[in-house]
Image (tube, grey):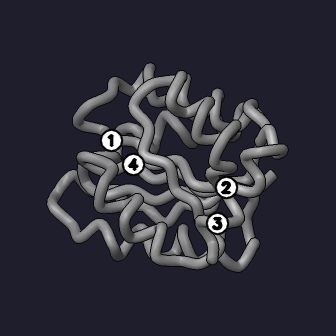
Amino acid sequence: MKIALGNDHAGTEYKVEIIKLLESRDITVINYGTNELTSVDYPDFVHPVANDVDKKLVDFGILVCGSGNGGSMTDNKYPNVRAGLCWTKEITELTRQHNNANILSIPARYTSIQQSLAMVETFLDTPFEGGRHQDRVAKICK
């Protein structure tokens, strides 16, 4: 499995821990995020992730920024991207099961690193249910 990862300054510490988790699961990580804690413009780190997911160069994407909103708004401009803004494991599970999300957007200012790691595991381990949800997802991408 291959995952593109992007973050702004609010997500730098989270990114380090997420990479450790992914590598412990033998997942290849393409790191597009900043390594700095000084302010940066999140779209610069979001577009490469969304592009990789859109073009199917990776299996999934993960974004970490302050609120998660800017990242998911930017991502969802791409036709084959379904980014889910999640702040609990339960919401993460539903965004995979019902929406077939292919990018997890994490709000660093509203979740702990431990919560974020649990959400990443849930995101990776939860399959899309298909069925009635497939018809709904198809309507998203019209």
Q: Position of residue 92 (x, y in %)?
A: 55, 33
Mark 4 lies on a secondary structure that is strand
Q: Residue at x 53, y 47 (%)?
A: 104
Q: Could you classify mark 1 by the number of other residues whose Cα lies within 10 Å: few (under 14), some (14-19), or many (20 or more)? A: many
Q: For this view, does 127 lie left or right of residue 10? A: right
For marks 2 and 1 on the same chain, the one whose residue lies earlier in the sequence: 1
Q: For this view, does 77 lie left or right of residue 19? A: left
Residue 136's disc is 2
Mark 3 lies on a secondary structure that is helix
Q: Could you classify mark 4 by the number of other residues whose Cα lies within 10 Å: few (under 14), some (14-19), or many (20 or more)? A: many
The residues bearing labels 2 and 3 have C-alpha atoms spaced at a distance of: 5 Å
- Whether pointer 2 and pointer 1 mark residues with C-beta atoms closer than 8 Å, the reply is no
Residue 139's disc is 3
For marks 4 and 2 on the same chain, the one whose residue lies earlier in the sequence: 4
Amino acid type for the residue under numbered disc 2: Arg
Report which quarter residue 35 is drawn in.
bottom left
- Whether pointer 2 and pointer 3 mark residues with C-beta atoms closer than 8 Å, the reply is yes
For marks 1 and 4 on the same chain, the one whose residue lies earlier in the sequence: 4
Q: Which residue is mark 4?
A: 64
Q: Which residue is mark 1?
A: 107
